[in-house]
Amino acid sequence: MAQKDYYKILGVERNASPDEVKKAFYKLAHQYHPHKAGKDEKKFKEFNEKFKEINEAYQVLSDKDKRAQYDRFGQVFEGAQQGGGEWPFGAGQGFDPSQGFGGFDFNGNMGDMGDLGDIFETFFGGGQPRRRTYQRGSDIEVAQEITLEEAFAGVRKHLEYKTSISCDKCKGLGYDKKEGKITCSTCAGRGEIRENRKTFFGTFAQNKACPECKGFGEVPKKVCPECKGAGRQEGVRQVDVDVVPGVGNDQIIKVKGMGEAGERGSETGDLYIRIKEKSHPFFKREGDNLFVAEDLKLTEALLGKKIKIKDLNGQMFDVDLPVGFNFKERMRVGGKGMPHLHGMGRGDLYLEFDLKLPKKLSEKAKKIIEELGKEI
């Protein structure tokens, strides 16, 4: 039977440091913990097997002697890789990772170690009290449609959108400023309380957010009746934004401080406006270049006359048709395209000609064309 590639399982190089091996394990353990499968039985089994495989690889690569054996012989002779392996902290054989840790799950985002590292730290010697801080408001993204003409000339747009805004009554504080706040008596201002939890490993002391002050360490003497202490409520923001000439489709305009209101007077999030450019009935845009189809008479094509073209901004200009020009090709007119964003000059305009032939010819016209055919 082919030997397992533990390095491939953890996604690390063969020369990976112990710290890199540990971080790779934490990341994968967070990703494939069976609790992540929810009620999906098939996914639960897959995650359970993957979790055991990850743990097995970690047991070998995190142990200096076992790793040396594995690198030399492709296996470990003491049987450490059999039976699903041990949990990294020596919990013993037969541990079922699907049972979790005393009711904890692995939700949340990964930082260097993520919430998984926080759980390990709480159980095995860490878990320092951390007083909660007020959260900055979330950023918001809205879409704003503009026409190609507006993208060409620039435009000022007025936006209205629903979001959380600071409470007018308490000015975003969530309480009566005159009354002030007091230290939470439940946690003595720590923001956390300790409680004993029974887990697979035994009974451990665990820090958790204080239920009275919600982790802040302080409680207001008089909560704002309007926002119920949140400091913010649902409302409508209005903002005027200048769309500069040359802006492109899907480009982002940032408006600082116009996002969701922060928690209890903390920093407000930002607004991101995504530009959506409407299609034009005549002009097509590619970057800063424009393309347009123009009807061309046979006489104009043969005689090389000047033709009049209307610019995107409505201005007329003349274009000289060169003698012998291949009208199946595009004609480039420099400097008649879109303005360069935050720069000087403009892109180019490309003319695509559609040669229009007369539907009927008089006898006189036929003779003239026949004579012309003899000449050319």
Image: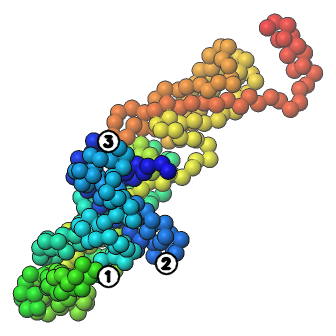
Q: Which secondary structure, mark 3?
A: helix
Say whether disc 2 or disc 1 marks the residue closer to the N-terminus. 2
Q: Which of the 4 image quadrants contains residue 352?
A: top right
Q: Is residue 324 above or below residue 176?
A: above
Which numbered marker is on residue 64?
none
Secondary element type, mark 2: loop
Instruction: State the image quarter where residue 361 is shown.
Output: top right
- Residue drawn at (27%, 46%), measured in percent from left and top? 68
Q: Secondary structure at mark 1?
A: loop
Number of residues whose C-alpha sits closer than 10 Å to that of mark 2, classed few (under 14), some (14–19) or many (20 or more) = few
Q: Nearer the viewer, residue 10 or 261?
A: 10
Q: Are marks 3 and 2 in contact (CB under 8 Å)?
A: no
Q: Residues within 10 Å of mark 3 (few under 14, many from 20)?
A: few
Per the model, the C-alpha gap separating discs 1 and 3 is 40 Å
Instruction: Tell which of 142 and 355 is nearer to you.
Output: 142
Depicted 188 relative to depicted 348: above or below: below
Disc 1 crowd rating (10 Å Cα; few below 14, some 14-19, many 20+) is few
Task: Residue type at mark 1: give it.
Answer: Gly
Percent x, y of residue 268 = 24, 68
Q: Nearer the viewer, mark 1 or mark 3?
A: 3
How many numbered marks have been drawn onto this rendered protein structure? 3
Q: Measured from the top left, where is residue 34 in percent x and y?
A: 41, 71
Tag 3: amino acid: Arg
Q: Quadrant of the C terminus?
A: top right
- Residue 63 visible in the current orientation: yes
The label shown at residue 39 is 2
